Image (spheres, rainbow, N blue to C red):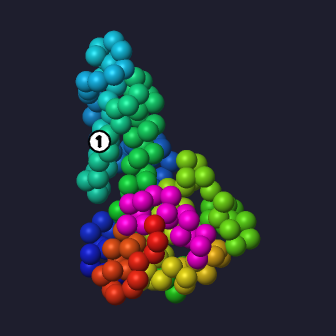
Amino acid sequence: MHVEDEKLLVQPPHPASLDPQDLLAQCTTRTGRVSGPGGTNRNKVDTAIELIHDPTGLSVTATERRSQHQNRSRAIDRLRRRLAIECRTRIDPKRQRPSELWAQRRQGDKMPINPRHEDYPTLLAEAMDLVTARRYDLAGAAGMLGITMSQLCRLIRHEKKAMARINQGRDRIGLHRIKA
């Protein structure tokens, strides 16, 4: 892996793959109030949620709902996505095999996943780990994952920051950018 890719290197399992309770156990949670629309409840109750992932220092907030419970759910989803994009687990690109979840979700050479599905961050993290370990060789990573390169690009492209990170890595080593 490139030195720049190791800024947030984590031990398996990837934190984006943890269930919400296990992920919350690794986080500091802060609540607060924010101004703006939302009615009286927003001004009386601490509905805003900030999650700080203690092992990595990554943080996210959710303030758009009037319910702390709904904001917590949104913050967990945002944190899982951010972890999938910004954290890498060290893998052997020659020996890596698709996870059980990947094998269950894959249909032939396609990966039909709605980006709003709870499994999406886990699958994105797995794809990003392999692409990064293979020095941004999307075709090779797709082959190892048992899907087409266009399906892999589609999976990554759902998160603009993920595609931007892939393209930054490709730029660093002199490869052409993938269309976003």
| Label 1 secondary element | strand
Does residue 132 lie above or below 66 as drawn?
below
The residue drawn where x is 35% and y is 48% is 26
The furthest residue to the front:
179
Q: Residue at x 41, y 83 (%)?
A: 176
Of residues 114 and 96, the one nearer the viewer is: 114
Segment tinted magenta in the rendering? 149-164
**Location of residue 135 (image quadrant):** bottom left
Location of the N terminus (image quadrant): bottom left
In magenta stretch: residue 159:
yes
User: Is any part of residue 97 visible from this angle?
Assistant: no
Residue 53, percent from left and from top: 31, 50
Residue 149 placement, left or right of 86: right
Q: Position of residue 74 (x, y in %)?
A: 44, 39
Q: Is residue 76 visible to the viewer in this orientation of the structure?
A: yes
Does residue 35 appear left or right of residue 170 in this picture? left
Q: Is residue 86 magenta?
A: no
Q: Is residue 82 above or below residue 155?
A: above
* Horizontal side of residue 18 vs 24, given as left or right: right
Q: Residue furthest right?
A: 108
Q: Residue at x 45, y 58 (%)?
A: 159
In which quadrant of the rendered view does residue 95 lie?
A: bottom right
Residue 162 is situated, as x and y percent measured from the top left of the image, at 41, 63
Horizontal relation, residue 79 to residue 100: left or right: left
> x and y percent of residue 8 in the render?
30, 66
Amino acid found under the numbered disc labelled 1: Thr
Name above or below for residue 62 compared with residue 128: above
Q: Which residue is mark 1?
A: 28
- The rendered magenta stretch, by its main secondary structure, is classed as helix
